Every structure is written in C-alpha cells, then in structure tokens.
Image (spheres, coloured by chain):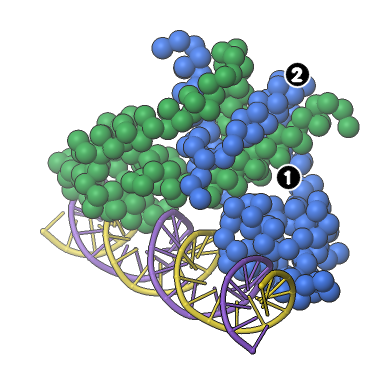
Chain colours: A blue, B green, C purple, D yellow
Amino acid sequence: MDAGAEAVETIQREMTSFARRARASAGRLHPELSLVSYTLLGHLEESGGCRATDLAAHYALDKSTVSRQVSALERAALIERRPDPEDHRVQVLHLTDTGRRILAQVTESRRTAFRERLADWPAEDLERFAEYLVRYNAWAGTTVSGRPPRR
Amino acid sequence: MDAGAEAVETIQREMTSFARRARASAGRLHPELSLVSYTLLGHLEESGGCRATDLAAHYALDKSTVSRQVSALERAALIERRPDPEDHRVQVLHLTDTGRRILAQVTESRRTAFRERLADWPAEDLERFAEYLVRYNAWAGTTVSGRPPRR
DNA sequence: CTTCCTGGTTGCATAGTACAACTCGGGCGG
DNA sequence: CCGCCCGAGTTGTACTATGCAACCAGGAAG
C-alpha cells in the first residue's frame, strides 16, 4: 500500500474515532445547550431570525424534531416566536437577549477550549488543517461513512 | 484577528459541523451496523477477542450499554461468547465467521467511500491531513467542545 | 367553496445511553 | 470452611434525540 492509501486509512480511522467521541459528548456540550441546540441558536444569530422549516431543511432534521427543540429553547427563554404578519401559519424565530447571552457564553467557552487545545500548533499547520477540513466537509453530504445521507 | 486565530475558528466550526452530521448518520452507517457496533466489532477483530468490560473501559461506555450492544450483536450472530475457563465470571467475546464477513464488508464499503471522497487530493495533502487528525485526536479527551469528558 | 399545498404540532415507536440494584463467581483473612 | 468484599455481567427504569405518520390550520388556485 502506498503512502497515499495509508493516509486515507488513517483519515478514515481518525474521523471515525472523532465521530464516535463527538456523538458521546454532543449531549453535554454545555449544561445549557446540546450540540444541536447550539447549532440552531447559532443559525438564528447568523440569519437574524428564520422559520422552523428553514432550520429543518438546512440541517436535514425532521420538522418534528426541530419543533420539539424549538419548544425546549422557547421554554428556556432562549428564543421567542413571532407571528409572521404576512403568513399566519409561520412563526419567525428570534433569539432573546438571554439566548444571545447564553450563545455568546458557550461560543466563548468553546473558543477558549479550542485555542487551548491547539495552542502549541504552528500557525502554518493550523491554516493547513483548517483548509483541509473545509475541503473535506465541502464534499457533498458529509457523513461518517463518507457517503451522502439517503433522502 | 491574526491568521492563526482565524484558522482556529475555522477548525472549530468545521469540527462542529462534522460532529453534527456524523451524529445524524451514526445510526445508519450500514443497514447491519451502527457506528458503535462497528467500532466494537473492529475492536474484537484487532484484539482477537476480549471481555465486555474491556470494551466498556476502552470506549468510555457504561457496562450496561456494552452488555446490550453485545446481546444485539450476539442475536445477529456476529459475535459469540465463550466462557473463560480461568474465571467463570468472564465471557470472552469473539467474532463469528459471519461477524468477520460483515465487518469486512462494511469496512470495505467505507474504505471505498473514503477513497472516492479523497480521490482528487494530492498525496502530500492526504498525508498531512492524516497527521493533523492524529495530532488533534491525540489531545487527551477528544470531544466536540475540545474539553475532556467529565467522568 | 373545494381542493391542494405548506408550516407546525403531536402521538407513537425506536435507538442509545446512564444509573442503580442485583446475581454470581473468585479471592482472602480468619 | 466461612464470611466478606470485589469484579463481571444482566436487568429494570428513565431520559434524550430522533423519525414517521397523522393531524390541524392557514393560504392559494380553480
């Protein structure tokens, strides 16, 4: 096996290992927020408010799943639903001030953790690693197996 | 923000994104095998048989979780339990021929997927990416957040 | 108005997991 | 040998995240 093929094996193994551990820790990213909630909140921050259906489509989640997550986030007062005057079926989701604050906290805490973790990497390696990850994830349908999800 | 800090942000974002998608697809790695089952089977293959407790310790899973996974794998005839003549409390787990076959199938299918996905990467990049991943995962307690798991 | 589409909720089922209580066998000190 | 504690595994219970299907309500086209 040549070095390239060997490298592919290693990439596969390491990605699998990462996926497994990530799965185990996704629920306790933060006492307040699961990985999915964090992602949804982040999306709301970026988009400045959107519909539940948009979230479902964007993250390939079932609308029922999003509905429940949204309910939980609303119960926790991190987001609020605003009726859409244009279309009464729609609820536009917005971060509350609390939501923005918690999101910022978690983001900051994760940022610190990542910085610490990558502290002794040379800048050149960081940049290359970042570029590789982007390239890897850009491949349509990033999954553990490397194959696109069904749907 | 300097380029290194920017790269750390990107790494965080991409790892998060990968983790989320991996989580979503972990259950349907293969019709036969979840990501966890696949990992356990792989460990049995490598180790040539071990105890359920060893699996639990190695993967930081509860022994009850492993016990149920093992039951399922045994029901599917992918592994078998052999009594340990040395210690009657112990069941040494071994792959069956079917288990070896399925494991090989899944491994092959994933290998193909990864090869395809990484097909147009220069060998040099593959090697560096592999090395970065190893270095990243080697950091004690690989999680999504970058922080070690509680326990 | 009737029909169809769309956004969202809810009931039901499932997977994966942890924790705790329990059983059973093994190893030791007396 | 006996009593005790420990370690391997199992089982009961509960919880989370999830998907699918059925459903409801608002909107749009005829």
> Residue B23 placed where, x, y %?
54, 48
In the displayed structure image, the side of residue B109 where residue A11 appears, left or right: right
Instruction: Tell me which corner region of the image, top left, top right, bottom left or bottom right, holds residue C4.
Output: bottom right
Q: Which residue is mark 1?
A: A110
> Residue A143 placed where, x, y %?
53, 40
Q: Residue at x 64, y 55 (%)?
A: A57
Instruction: Tell me which corner region of the image, top left, top right, bottom left or bottom right, holds residue B59.
Output: top left
In the displayed structure image, the side of residue A34 where residue B7 appears, left or right: right
- Disc 2 is placed on an element classified as helix
- Chain holding disc 2: A
* B78 vs B24, nearest the viewer: B24
Labels 2 and 1 touching (C-beta < 8 A):
no
> Residue B137 placed where, x, y %?
58, 32
Distance between the Cα atoms at labels 2 and 1?
Answer: 22 Å
In the displayed structure image, the side of residue B60 where residue A136 appears, left or right: right
Q: Is residue A131 above or below residue D2?
A: above
Can the viewer see residue A37?
A: no
Q: Which residue is mark 2?
A: A124
